[in-house]
């Protein structure tokens, strides 16, 4: 008997002859968590009758906040009010970080396990699903000589299915420990782009979201070793990802219709891949990331020595960072280096830290510039 048939037989047996133990124990009442109130405060709840301490960590409060238990072991706390945005949060139960088991909206990540809470404002957010034409997000696998079959997501805009047009393409790379799903589920790139297209602020484009982990660790971005990881991603992108995507989707082969951008590690990978392939990319975006002068001087000396030629090749080089970002100083140094070398670019410094709230902000800004 195959494992699947065996499981089916066991399931049938359990349905036909339920045990007295499983029939007697009632399930606990369903918990609603999080609950967003009209005043933009949020109630978090977690059932843990045997826990000694339960806390919640959010990105709209500073530090962990303690929950209080009732007599049935249901812990709760109300926090805020918070500024409207989409925030990650997680519980810490006796020192162990866990996602909210009552919330379906999870943060895709390899290391930390978080959930998402959306705190709406008076007007729909740019990342919210609105009553506009929608495209599609497809889960794909491409053949990688280095890794075997490897995942990526591809977004096609509204109307893609009904034309034979070749579209511009944005390769959008997530950060350290994020997955290929993070720009979709946390970055909400599909909704942001659709809302901007409906407002005639962005052009329809395909967005490719690859998995950026090169499975060789993540060296400190201040070191030359980081460039080796960036180079490995660049080889994967050009040698495997782009041939697959351009063979499966209607994408323009024109370099002026290709962009690459990313957040955190993905921003470093995007800068390196873009500068390495200006014959393929004319638009580059860096969100909370940078290249050190040492890396630039080692790998891209011709670009720095001939800024007029570099500037003619680049339609847009864009860098953004938050004042509270732990990479702020290095990102500003990169900005100053570009100015010193007379490499034209746009830069944006915002409030906030190394967060996906800022990443969405930077994405929204650059989507309005790409391919214009």
Image (tube, rainbow, N blue to C red):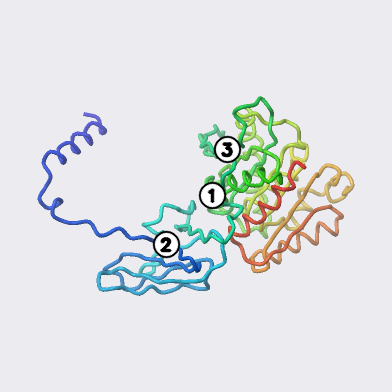
Element at badge 1? Answer: helix
Taking 147 as reference, is 337 left or right?
right
* The label number, if any, that marks residue 135 in the structure image: 3
* The label number, if any, that marks residue 205 in the structure image: none
Taking 3 as reference, is 251 left or right?
right
Q: Measuring 18% from the left and 38% from the top, which residue is drawn there?
A: 10
The reply to whether dot 2 and dot 3 touch (C-beta < 8 Å) is no
Mark 2 highlights which residue? Answer: 34
**For residue 9, what is the image quadrant?**
top left
Mark 1 highlights which residue? Answer: 182
Residue 35 visible in the current orientation: yes
Circle 2 packing at 10 Å, graded few (<14), some (14-19), many (20+), is many
Q: Measuring 32% from the left and 73% from the top, which residue is drawn there?
A: 69
- Residues at marks 2 and 1, CA–CA distance in whole angstroms: 21 Å
Q: Nearer the viewer, residue 187 or 327?
A: 187
Q: Is residue 228 above or below residue 241?
A: below
Q: Which of marks 3 and 1 is in front?
A: 3
């Amino acid at each position: 008997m195959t494992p699947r048939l065996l499981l089916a037989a066991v399931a049938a047996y359990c349905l036909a002859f339920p045990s007295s133990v499983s029939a007697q124990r009632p399930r606990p009442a369903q918990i609603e968590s999080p609950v967003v109130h009209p005043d933009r405060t949020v109630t978090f709840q977690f059932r843990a009758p045997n826990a000694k301490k339960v806390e919640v960590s959010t990105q709209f409060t500073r530090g962990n906040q303690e929950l209080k238990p009732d007599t049935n072991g249901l812990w709760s706390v109300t926090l805020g009010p918070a500024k409207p945005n989409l925030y990650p949060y997680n519980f810490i139960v006796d020192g162990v970080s866990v996602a909210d088991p009552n919330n379906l909206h999870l943060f895709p990540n390899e290391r930390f396990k978080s959930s998402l809470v959306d705190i709406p404002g008076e007007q729909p957010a740019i990342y919210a699903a609105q009553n506009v034409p929608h495209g599609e997000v497809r889960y794909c696998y491409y053949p990688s000589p280095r890794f075997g079959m490897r995942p990526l997501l591809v977004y096609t805009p509204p109307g893609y299915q009904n034309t034979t047009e070749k579209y511009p393409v944005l390769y959008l790379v997530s950060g350290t420990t994020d997955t290929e799903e993070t720009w979709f589920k946390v970055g909400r790139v599909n909704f942001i782009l659709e809302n901007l297209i409906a407002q005639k602020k962005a052009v329809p484009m395909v967005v490719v979201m690859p998995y950026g982990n090169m499975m060789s660790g993540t060296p400190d971005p201040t070191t030359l070793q980081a460039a080796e990881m960036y180079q490995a991603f660049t080889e994967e992108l050009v040698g495997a990802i782009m041939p697959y995507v351009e063979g499966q989707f209607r994408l323009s082969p024109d370099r002026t219709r290709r962009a690459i951008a990313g957040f955190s590690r993905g921003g470093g990978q995007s800068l390196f891949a873009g500068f390495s392939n200006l014959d393929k990319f004319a638009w580059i975006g860096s969100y909370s990331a940078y290249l050190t002068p040492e890396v630039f001087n080692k790998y891209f000396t011709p670009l720095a020595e001939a800024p007029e030629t570099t500037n003619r090749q680049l339609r847009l080089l864009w860098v953004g960072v938050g004042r509270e970002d732990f990479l702020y100083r290095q990102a500003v140094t990169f900005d100053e280096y570009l100015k010193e070398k007379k490499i034209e670019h746009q830069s944006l410094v915002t409030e906030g830290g190394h967060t996906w709230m800022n990443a969405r902000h930077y994405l929204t800004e650059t989507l309005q510039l790409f391919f214009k």
